[in-house]
Image: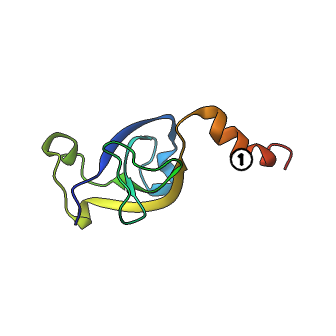
């Protein structure tokens, strides 16, 4: 277990149907860095590769403490310091 998770709000939301949530969409996620020695508090390296997890037990939003069975890893991502940096990195996919 780690102590460097970040709770984030997302927009647009993720459709909950694919996760068995019916019409309830996912509006918050938990992220953490993927590489040892990197940090989100503050972000120590840009861009920063992260793990993305969805919340299975809504009580963790209030308690700010959770176990492995209360979240589910749903992906990896990269966060950038600025939108322009992300566009420069991934803009090549615009025409695909």
Nearer the observer, 90 or 25: 90
Residue occupying the far right of the picture: 95
Who's the residue at 40% across and 62% down the image? 73
The residue most toward the left is 63
Q: Which image quarter holds the N terminus?
A: bottom left
Point 76% across, 43% down: residue: 91
Looking at the picture, does residue 76 appear above or below residue 47? below
Q: Nearer the viewer, residue 95 or 27?
A: 95
Name the residue nearer the viewer: 36 or 6: 36
As drawn, 13 above or below 92 = above
* Residue on which the image places disc 1: 90
Q: Helix, strand, or loop for circle 1?
A: helix
- The picture places residue 78, in percent across and down from the top left corner, at 54, 51
Q: Is residue 57 left or right of residue 73?
A: left
**Residue 51: x %, y % from top left:** 43, 59
Circle 1 crowding by C-alpha within 10 Å: few under 14, some 14–19, many from 20: few
Colour scheme in use = rainbow
| Identity of the residue drawn at 72% across and 41% down | 88
What residue is at 52 percent from the left and 37 percent from the top?
81
Query: What count of labels does the image hold?
Result: 1
In the image, residue 13 sits, relative to residue 39, either above or below, namely above
Q: Residue 15 at what x, y percent from top left?
A: 52, 44
Above or below residue 45? Residue 71 is below
Tell me where residue 13 appears, x and y as whole percent: 50, 37
């Amino acid at each position: 277990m780690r102590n460097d998770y970040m709770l984030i709000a997302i927009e647009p939301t993720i459709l909950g149907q694919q996760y068995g949530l019916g019409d309830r969409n996912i509006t918050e996620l938990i992220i953490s860095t993927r590489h040892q020695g990197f940090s989100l508090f503050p972000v120590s390296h840009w861009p920063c590769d992260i793990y993305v997890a969805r919340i299975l037990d809504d009580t963790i939003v209030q308690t700010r403490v959770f176990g492995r069975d209360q979240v589910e890893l749903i992906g990896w991502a990269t966060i950038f310091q600025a939108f322009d940096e992300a566009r420069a990195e991934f803009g090549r996919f615009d025409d695909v």
